[in-house]
Amino acid sequence: MIQSEQDRQFVLGLLNTWARNTKIKMFLRNGDLEGLTSSILDRFYHVTLCCGHKVKEFNEGIELEEKSNNCLYSGVYCKDCADKLIKEGYRKVE
């Protein structure tokens, strides 16, 4: 499962509610809750793929390769990005 902007907004909303209800929001600096949100999500989505997306496990990625200028390029991409790259000529590594 790819970390999404929806996940980020959900966690940020929870933290905003918590900070407001515990009356500590006024003591926080700009960006504190966003930083905490990133820290929480990084704990669960800690593998960054070649496309920049984060996933929970490395085996969630798809390994692709492309031969260009007598060089072989390969990397691990999320399913969505891999589908786009396959259409552009990359091939799946078995």
Image: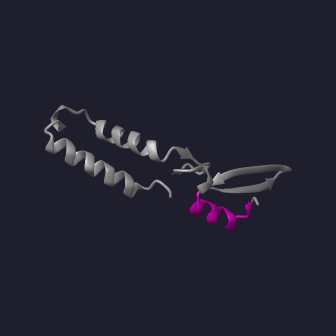
Question: Considering only vertical position in the picture, is 43 above or below 63?
Answer: above
Q: Please identify the residue farthest to the right as the structure is shown.
A: 70
33 lies left or right of 44: left
Counting every numbered tag in the picture gives 0
Residue 68 coordinates in the image, percent (x, y): 80, 53
55 lies left or right of 7: right
Which residue is rendered at x = 71% and y = 57% of the image? Answer: 64
Near-viewer residue (71 or 8): 8
Which residue is rendered at x = 57% and y = 63% of the image? Answer: 80
* Residue 65 found in image quarter: bottom right
Residue 83 coordinates in the image, percent (x, y): 63, 66
The reply to whether the magenta stretch includes residue 65 is: no
17 lies left or right of 37: left
Q: Main secondary structure of the magenta part?
A: helix
Indicate the quadrant containing the C terminus: top left, top right, bottom left or bottom right: bottom right
Q: Which residues are magenta?
A: 78-92
Question: Considering only vertical position in the picture, is 29 above or below 44?
Answer: above
Residue 85 coordinates in the image, percent (x, y): 66, 62
Residue 39 coordinates in the image, percent (x, y): 40, 39
Which residue is rendered at x = 69% and y = 50% of the image? Answer: 75
Which residue is rendered at x = 15% and y = 40% of the image? Answer: 22
The reply to whether the magenta stretch includes residue 83 is: yes
